[in-house]
Image: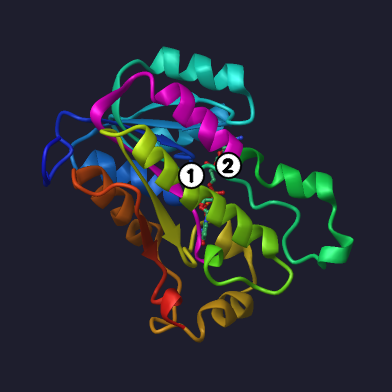
Amino acid sequence: MNGTAMSLEGKRAVVIGGASGIGFAVAALSKEMGAQVVIASRDAARVAAAVERVPGATGLTVDLRDEAGVAGFFEALGAFDHLAVTAGDWGGTRFVATKDLDLAAARDGLEIRFWGVLAAVKYGSRTIAPDGSITMTSGLMAHRPRKGAPLATAIGGAVEHLARGLAVDLAPVRVNAVSPGMILTEIVKLAPEETLRAWVAGLPLPRGATPAEAATAYIYLMLNGYVTGQVVPVDGGGLLV
Ligand SMILES: NC(=O)c1ccc[n+]([C@@H]2O[C@H](COP(=O)([O-])OP(=O)(O)OC[C@H]3O[C@@H](n4cnc5c(N)ncnc54)[C@H](OP(=O)(O)O)[C@@H]3O)[C@@H](O)[C@H]2O)c1
């Protein structure tokens, strides 16, 4: 795509992590914008349930921890235009004193969100349209560290810098990242309400975002043909305070 389009009509968009949360909202909005949508994640039943909620979408399973599986996924998928990756686990290493860190768990924290994303890009880059885009997911904590969670900062930073490197390496395919603040996805809403309130209390916009608000950033990065190597925050002004 040259320049800026206002719809995804005629485009094929793939969302890895699309079975729930931010990814599901990206899939639903891509469909609304006219794309052919492929919802992918690890669990077949959850993919099937998501596909049912987005009429016309198709579903495939893929486990980003499994390189051969990722290769097979992209082979089965064939040609496509846009890839959004929101897949991630929330890690077992958060809010642990560094002196007590389980290093194996710390390494594992990068397994899906960095190495898994890189596997998806490796195989996806073979069949993505030259005017297509790849959008990854970092997080506000990349820039606003919290006591007890240095790895969350490191993982987000690694994703953002991977996007910058890939934007040059894979050009003209565009590569960007979205940096969510607190997005009220199903899994986030499991936290106690006071905890959620405390997280956003000092923000210029003191609330969590809807998954749909996060999804619009991914759609923007698919549509705008002149943006690459960038990080788009959806954080209620979290970078300002
Ligand atoms: N929500 C927030 O406030 C927030 C803020 C900053 C950053 N983030 C990051 O944004 C991403 C999405 O967050 P979310 O709240 O939307 O989370 P979510 O609802 O838990 O969604 C994560 C998705 O990733 C998929 N997934 C997990 N492991 C996978 C694997 N090995 N291979 C393929 N797919 C896998 C899950 O698939 P199954 O359902 O099939 O297991 C699920 O669909 C996460 O990486 C999170 O760390 C979120």
Residue 81 image-quadrant placement: top left
Q: Secondary structure at mark 1?
A: helix
Residue type, numbered disc 2: Phe
Residue 162, numbered circle:
1
Q: Is residue 64 above or below residue 76?
A: below
Find disc 2 in the rendering and name its residue.
114
Residue 88 image-quadrant placement: top right
Q: Is mark 2 within 8 Å of ligand 1?
A: no
**Label 2 close to label 1 by CB (< 8 Å):** yes
Residue at 57%, 34% in the rendered image: 116
Residue 48 seen by the camera:
no
Q: Is residue 148 left or right of residue 165?
A: right
Residue 56, numbered circle:
none
Q: Is residue 165 left or right of residue 45?
A: left
Packing grade of label 2 (10 A; few <14, some 14-19, many >=20) is: many
What is the magenta range?
A: 114-140
Distance (Cα) linking label 2 and label 1 = 8 Å
Q: Is residue 83 left or right of residue 64?
A: left
